Amino acid sequence: MFGYVRYDLPNLLIKDFMLYKALYCGLCKSIGASCGQRARLGLTYDVTFLSALLHNMTGTDVRVERQNCFEHAIRKRPIAAVDDLTMELGALNTVLTYYKLADDITDGSGGRVKRAWFKKGYRRAKKRYPALVSLVEEYASAQAEVEKKRSPSPDEAAEPTAQLMRGLCAHFMGERSTPAAEDLFYAVGKWVYLIDALDDYEKDVKKKRYNPFVLAYGCATRAELMQAQGQEIAFLFDTLFYAMREGLAGVKFYFNRDLTDNVILRGIPLETQRVMRGEPYREMSGELKELKA
């Protein structure tokens, strides 16, 4: 996962914004507990979203406590307490970061020093959660095969990420997993891969790296791509939005679903529009510090 799963702040209630902040900080602490302090530098918005979604879908209550951390050593702030779910999600965050850096190395984008920074955390995750790491390893192998054959199909290229997310749904939810829940995760995973590929279009053209959109359409720039094939690409993403809505409709939530609905129904489409317009990536770290605990 690559940092694209985000909320829509203007339409996010303050209570849900505060919950997101607490989950974000709680995941950071959970990464440290499961994989060591170095691994906390790989904290992502995407796994924070998974924390919100899986706590709700599994009926695992989020216990928020006022705590300190290394960034907020003086003033305590609301932080989600570490639990078994966030411990394993912290390991997932570390393993995904490690493989993302490995992929960067393969692409010739550097990252050897960064990957070494996360190597110990990866080993701890593999020892503690072998089944989880096995899922990610299968995904990495399948993704490498698709890229090796240089498939020009966006659907085929996104399939390993989509299947990883489906597998993660079944892994974390266990007996509670349903076809609707797995379809939701599958659609989100497919979207994550495709939006990253579209966002990296011009960089991949310049560096001659694998990108299914480049191979499928061959335009020199993303602007040219959207001008020539914008309707087809918009339709591709619209089908994923529909699949997400259908999945949401069939999922049982145990608690308030305002936060996850905001991300899936508003944040993801808005992020898609940003990428299709060619606008720069916007960090959310400043927003997460706006409301002081």
Image (cartoon, rainbow, N blue to C red):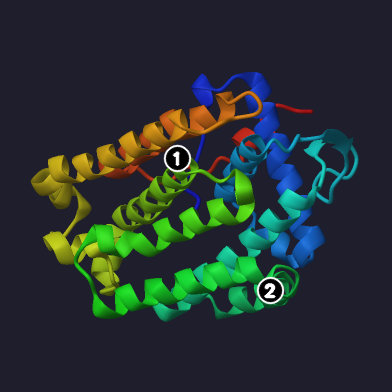
**Residue 209 spot, x, y in % from top left:** 29, 73
Rendering quarter of residue 18: top right
Figure disc tally: 2
Camera sees residue 27: yes
Rendering quarter of residue 12: top right
Q: Residue at x 84, y 47 (%)?
A: 69
Mark 2 packing: few (<14 Cα in 10 Å), some, or many (20+)? some
Above or below 102: residue 155:
above
| Label number found at residue 166 | none
- As drawn, is 206 to the left or to the right of 88? left
Q: Which residue is mark 2?
A: 126
Q: Secondary structure at mark 2?
A: helix
Q: Secondary structure at mark 1?
A: helix
The C terminus - image quarter: top right
Q: Residue at x 67, y 54 (%)?
A: 89
Amino acid marked by disc 2: Lys
Q: Nearer the viewer, residue 286 or 235?
A: 235
Q: Between disc 2 and disc 1, whose residue precedes?
A: 2
The reply to whether dot 2 and dot 1 touch (C-beta < 8 Å) is no
Above or below 243: residue 137:
below
**Residue 8 spot, x, y in % from top left:** 49, 29
Q: Nearer the viewer, residue 285 or 130?
A: 130
The residue most toward the left is: 228
Q: Nearer the viewer, residue 245 or 252?
A: 252
Above or below 197: residue 106:
below
Q: Which residue is mark 1?
A: 180
Mark 1 packing: few (<14 Cα in 10 Å), some, or many (20+)? some
Give the mark toward the camera: 2 or 1: 1
**Residue 145 spot, x, y in % from top left:** 34, 78
Camera sees residue 8: no
Amino acid marked by disc 1: Ala
